[in-house]
Amino acid sequence: MTDPMLFPNADESAQPSDGVSRRRLMTGTATAGMVAAAGCVGSDESTAQPTVFIFNTGDGTVSLIDPAADEVIETRAIGLSSSFPSNQYTPGLTDDISDSLWLNVGQGVRGLSLDGFSETATVETESGANWLEQTPNGQHIVVSAREPAHKQFRIEADPSSDTFGEVNGEIDRTPEGGRGDNAGPGPCDITVHPDGQYAYVPDLYGDTLTVLSIDPFEIETQITVDPVDDGPSAPWMGTVSWDGDTLLVEHNEGETGTESIWDVNDPANPTLSARLTADDGLGERPLTSEIGPDSATGYVFTPGTEDVTVVDLESGTVTDHLDLGGSAFVGTWNPARTKLYVPVQTNNEVAVIDHETGAVVDQLSVGPSPYGATAATVRPPSDSLAALGTAMAQLGIWSESTETTYCIGKCACGHEL
């Protein structure tokens, strides 16, 4: 039986990607004509302003939030969406208007410049289910491409490099095989240790936790993850703490999901510290997580119970539940790491969690079906033409189709693996 969490469109009439490039907003003749008539209008305003980016899967727009005022500055059409953009170290690394946001789009990974969201790089991975993170020094993007590729990629992310945007490392993991009829272990998600030497990959179909060496790009360690009960442990998402001591891993295990906590003081050799289930107070269907700036608190997004499960990482216990009133799958910190921004996809809003008070302090209306989130210390300059593109997107009037992104649980319509 097909798992609806993994394949949300399995029973729907899909509109699969035909492989045609849809990467630039203003490329169709109808839109180009309107742009020519309107002329180019920009802004000389300062771009050195922290910004949170929320990707709305419903219409291919991105909502820009000012985290100082907790206000939506604008919602801009970009012709694509991203469910799991790089957001661990990217907010601190993205400090120039020419820098890139790194996104999972279509059948691969995309870089978009903050100067107008123009494309800076694209890598096809042979899979529609991709997760990526930037290394702490900004040199590389590391990628997990789940089925059918079952591959890991390392991409040059230094914009000064002659090989920027090119793959400079690849690991084919299909020889490992996978549970049942899966052709590989299903590398699902990737999180990078703050020392920059190792990355952690939960393997959904391998029931393993794989430690990658960043340089050389190879498998360092692989650990079999035992299940809580009789079924597979199915680890699929993970987040390492800022101090490098702790790793949270979410599991698509059983009827409600489980969570594991790992000691990574020896980064190449994680050891299991605790397992959390619904009996321990864990919310249902844990999908992803973020870790507080003090590295002591875990925020686990549990869309099955429409909340965020708060975990004390030292004691390995659930301490609170933050009601969201809808389903949220991911979140991102503002660059200062004081507030966590959580797209609540079913409500078309973003919940703002204040770390100091441990409470939801605001709810901001954004575009339809928000899913992915990341941040930067700079803001794209405003452009009067962007309002035209946004209006077209909201009305469904496009010269080209909007590119989709793979989402667990809920998905941009028509996406295929």
Image (cartoon, rainbow, N blue to C red):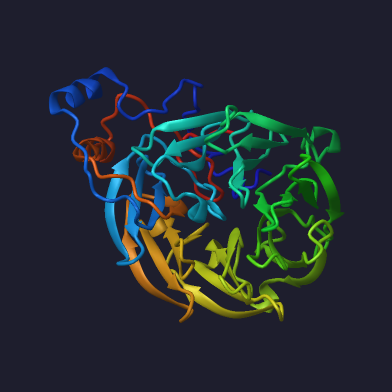
Of 86 and 258, nearer the camera is 86
Left/right placement of residue 222 relative to residue 254 reads right
Query: Residue 78 sits in which quadrant?
Result: top left
Query: Residue 392 sits in which quadrant?
Result: top left
Q: Residue furthest left?
A: 37
Please count the marks in the image. 0
Is residue 258 shown above or below 398? Answer: below
Of 196 and 229, nearer the camera is 196
Q: Position of residue 58 (x, y in %)?
A: 38, 44
Left/right placement of residue 163 relative to residue 246 reads left
Q: Residue furthest front?
A: 160
Q: Position of residue 214 (x, y in %)?
A: 73, 44
Residue at 74%, 51% in the rendered image? 197
Residue at 63%, 32% in the rendered image? 127
Query: Residue 351 sits in which quadrant?
Result: bottom left
Residue at 35%, 53% in the rendered image? 48
Quarter of the figure with the C terminus = top right
Q: Position of residue 297 (x, y in %)?
A: 60, 74
Of 403 and 385, nearer the camera is 385
Of 23 and 278, nearer the camera is 23
Left/right placement of residue 249 relative to residue 339 reads right
Q: Is residue 176 visible?
A: yes
Q: Is residue 179 visible?
A: no
Quarter of the figure with the N terminus = top right
Left/right placement of residue 271 relative to residue 101 reads right
Q: Position of residue 275 (x, y in %)?
A: 75, 70
